[in-house]
């Protein structure tokens, strides 16, 4: 990993990625290249002659054509209309109608660390100062953020501050994600044509329909092939991403926070900071995702120990909480090997359904006359951690808190927004509301020594006005939630927190700076989860995705699946249980215990390795797995999602192994049992398996067993000779 500098041209390199910056002249930096590593001397012979990267800069200059500005238009990381850019501007705002088009002049370039650049610039006529931080991380991610300061004597209204990353002309196809509650992370593809493809989220949370990663790539790119560039906005409130291609030959990805009208009004001396914008390049989606995964795993606060197998009580009891029932459920959880017991919604004052109680964060004495202590003591006597569900950002009108403080509800003056799930949003931008919630959370975690909070957020922010005049409040709400999480974690450093938001509606790297996993979806149907977990994996590694074994018949879809399919799907995430085990048969509990024991054996690999997918031509057959960092071992799932047109199943490739190494490939218990429309066995499907090179497994593959739809098997590859 190197950083080369020749004059004001910079070349950052890390993990197979190059980032070349042109910082010449007084204007903001331009990115000449973001993508594949260019090597030690991309400028050729000139590198040794002192000109360094000048040749790259020269070959990047476009010709002038008719009916365009008479000088080349530089497109900086913050595109400026004052430089001639007529696409989406990086900065939108004004000072009572003036200062709408600044022209920033760079005052200082500073390198605060390896592969880092801080740019400070000003536009004196507009009274604005700008700081841009740019970094190429050790995993090959590009990170950018900006800060805008009002140096004038009058307020400045900020409408947008967006940063961009360029992509090459051969990135001709776009991929992003959409979805809804119970069907998050649904991919959509289309051509990258001229114009702007804009994804805006105005839900006040990341959103079940969020783009998650906005990607551009070579036509037909898949998980293993084709160059691809992806962008993510690390923010949990309103945000936008876009892909833009102009007829002047510029293609870029961009994004940032989406601000409500008048939401950020900078008083003299005030500063607005953007969220981090992260870009990842790779050959194939797996390589692009791996950079995000490595970046997350390199964080000092990333979960380091084994991720505890978690039983959550929601789909077992819903609101019908009873000490006898819950202690029996805890006994069953311990029997099958669970390590954490989480009491879900319904424990607090007045909460018998979802119409009342939110905001009254006191244990309900009618249901729990001795508090939660008897349950907590029993759970801990079984060797289990104790977790608790909360929804601190929400309030029911039928609550003591709402009756005492109706002004604490996010709303536009004089009217309440439409209810969702019979609840409203508590205005945490108000210091008194914030202090109340912090005190209640601190008291609960302290009294019960809570190990884990399932932190929920069950509605969008609609008409989200704050204060007596109802000014836009989403930005302040998001910042307050971050501050609240930070303070709770400061007071309780051993506490783990899950980001849950109607399932997977708050999944982003802003919230994951402060939490330890996400609840990937409220839908635990294993067939739906195969897709949801796959595409959430574009951003998150498996250990951050809650993946639970549900009841035989899904509570959200009505589908019925066998235990092996349900458990084999949950195996590849942060495994847990969302099932009334007191109703399970003894045989079901024994089989579930086998799967949980297998997960515990495999989680050092599953939660540290590289996630891989085979681009299989049969859409009814999915192949995914995890390969150890040293490529000594891998586990793959062969998943039959529907009935295939062809039978037998044909060969499947097993990617990610060391090409020149040899492996023993064999079925892996308990995922070694399969049923299908076959009349003969599969010759290699034995405990001894077969020996093949990593290259043969990636290029040729192995004959897959023909499976009934909605079932799966596991395959293990172990390197020989070590």
Image: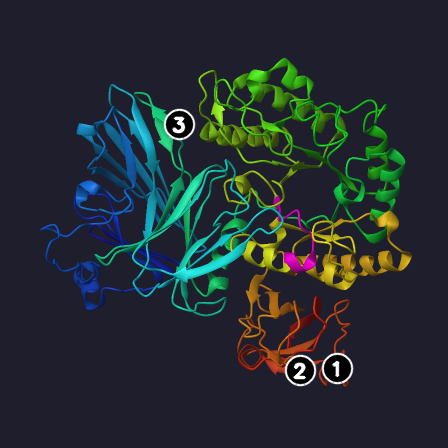
Query: Label 2's element?
Result: loop
Residue 550 pos. (x, y %): 75, 52
Q: Residues within 10 Å of mark 3 (few under 14, many from 20)?
A: some
Query: Label 3's element?
Result: loop
Mark 1–mark 2 contact, CB under 8 Å?
A: yes
Which quadrant would residue 139 be assigned to in this image?
bottom left
Is residue 608 something one can see in this rendering? no
**Does the magenta segment cover residue 665?**
no
Sequence-first disc among 1 and 3: 3
Q: Is residue 567 left or right of residue 692?
A: right
Residue 611 pos. (x, y %): 57, 62
Distance from the alpha carbon under mark 1 to that under mark 3: 63 Å
Query: Label 1's element?
Result: loop
Range of residues picked out in magenta: 517-529
Q: On residue 648, which mark appears?
A: 2
Residue 172 pos. (x, y %): 35, 64
**Does the magenta segment cover residue 518?**
yes
Q: Quadrant of the N terminus?
A: bottom left
Q: Is residue 646 left or right of residue 674?
A: left
Distance from the alpha carbon under mark 3 to that under mark 2: 60 Å
- Name the residue located 80 percent from the left edge and 40 percent from the top edge: 317
Q: On residue 678, which mark appears?
A: 1
Distance from the alpha carbon under mark 1 to that under mark 2: 8 Å
Residue that label 3 marks: 263
Q: Is residue 561 left or right of residue 240?
A: right
Which quadrant would residue 403 be assigned to in this image?
top right
């Amino acid at each position: 990993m190197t950083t080369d500098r020749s004059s004001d041209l910079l070349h950052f390199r890390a993990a197979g990625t190059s980032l070349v910056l042109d910082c010449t002249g007084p204007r903001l930096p331009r990115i000449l290249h973001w993508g594949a590593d260019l090597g030690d001397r991309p400028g050729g012979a000139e590198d040794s002659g002192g000109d360094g990267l000048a040749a790259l800069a020269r070959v990047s200059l476009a010709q002038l054509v008719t009916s365009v500005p008479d000088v080349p238009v530089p497109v900086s990381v913050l595109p400026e209309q004052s430089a001639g850019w007529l696409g989406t501007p990086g900065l939108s705002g004004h000072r009572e109608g003036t200062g709408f088009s600044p022209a920033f002049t760079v005052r200082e370039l500073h390198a605060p660390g390896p592969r880092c650049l801080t740019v400070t610039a000003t536009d004196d006529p507009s009274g604005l100062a700008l700081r841009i931080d740019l970094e190429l991380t050790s995993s090959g991610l590009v990170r950018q953020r900006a800060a805008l300061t009002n140096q004038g004597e009058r307020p400045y209204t900020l409408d947008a501050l967006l940063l961009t990353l360029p992509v090459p002309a051969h990135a001709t196809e776009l991929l992003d994600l959409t979805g809804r509650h119970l069907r998050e992370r649904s991919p959509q593809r289309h051509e990258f044509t001229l114009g702007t493809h804009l994804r805006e989220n105005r839900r006040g949370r990341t959103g079940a329909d969020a783009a998650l990663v906005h990607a551009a790539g070579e036509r037909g790119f898949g998980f293993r092939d084709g160059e691809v560039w992806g962008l993510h906005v690390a923010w949990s409130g309103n945000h936008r991403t876009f892909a833009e291609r102009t007829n002047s030959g510029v293609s870029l990805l961009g994004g940032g926070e989406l601000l409500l009208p008048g939401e950020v009004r900078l008083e003299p001396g005030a500063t607005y900071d953007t969220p981090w914008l992260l870009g990842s390049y790779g050959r194939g989606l797996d390589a692009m995702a791996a950079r995000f995964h490595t970046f997350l795993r390199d964080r000092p606060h990333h979960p380091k120990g084994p991720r505890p197998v978690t039983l959550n009580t929601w789909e077992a009891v819903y609101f019908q909480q009873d000490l006898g029932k819950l202690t029996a459920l805890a006994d069953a959880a311990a029997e099958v090997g669970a390590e954490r017991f989480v009491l879900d919604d319904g424990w607090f004052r007045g909460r018998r359904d979802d119409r009342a109680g939110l905001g009254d964060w006191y244990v309900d004495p009618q249901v729990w006359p001795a508090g939660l202590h008897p349950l907590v003591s029993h759970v801990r006597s079984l060797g289990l951690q104790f977790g608790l569900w909360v929804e601190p950002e929400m309030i029911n009108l039928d609550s003591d808190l709402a009756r005492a403080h109706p002004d604490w509800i996010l709303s536009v003056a004089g009217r309440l927004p439409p209810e969702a799930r019979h609840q409203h949003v508590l205005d945490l931008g108000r210091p008194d509301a914030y202090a109340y919630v912090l005190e209640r959370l601190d008291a609960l975690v302290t009294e019960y020594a809570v190990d884990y909070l399932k932190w929920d957020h069950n509605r969008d922010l609609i008409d989200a006005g704050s204060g007596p005049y109802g000014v836009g409040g989403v930005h302040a709400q998001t910042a307050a939630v971050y501050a609240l999480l930070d303070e709770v974690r400061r007071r309780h450093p051993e506490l783990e927190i899950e980001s849950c938001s109607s399932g997977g509606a708050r999944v982003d790297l802003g919230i994951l700076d402060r939490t330890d996993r996400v609840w990937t979806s409220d839908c635990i149907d294993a067939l739906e989860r195969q897709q949801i977990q796959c595409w959430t994996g574009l951003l998150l590694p498996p250990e951050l995705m809650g993946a639970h074994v549900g009841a035989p018949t899904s509570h959200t879809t009505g589908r019925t699946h066998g235990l092996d399919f349900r458990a084999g799907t949950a195996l590849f995430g942060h495994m847990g249980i969302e099932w009334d085990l007191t109703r399970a048969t003894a045989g079901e509990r024994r089989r579930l215990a086998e799967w949980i024991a297998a997960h515990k054996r495999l989680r050092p690999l599953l939660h540290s390795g590289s996630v891989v997918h085979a681009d299989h031509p049969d859409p009814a057959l999915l192949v995914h797995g995890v390969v150890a960092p040293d490529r000594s071992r891998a586990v793959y799932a062969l998943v039959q999602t529907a009935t295939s047109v062809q039978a037998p199943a044909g060969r499947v490739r097993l990617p990610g192994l060391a090409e020149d190494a040899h492996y023993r490939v064999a079925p892996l218990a308990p995922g070694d049992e399969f049923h299908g429309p076959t009349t003969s066995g599969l010759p290699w499907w034995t405990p001894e398996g077969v020996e093949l090179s990593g290259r043969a497994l990636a290029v040729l593959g192995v004959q897959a067993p023909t499976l009934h739809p909605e079932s799966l098997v596991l395959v293990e590859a172990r390197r020989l000779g070590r």
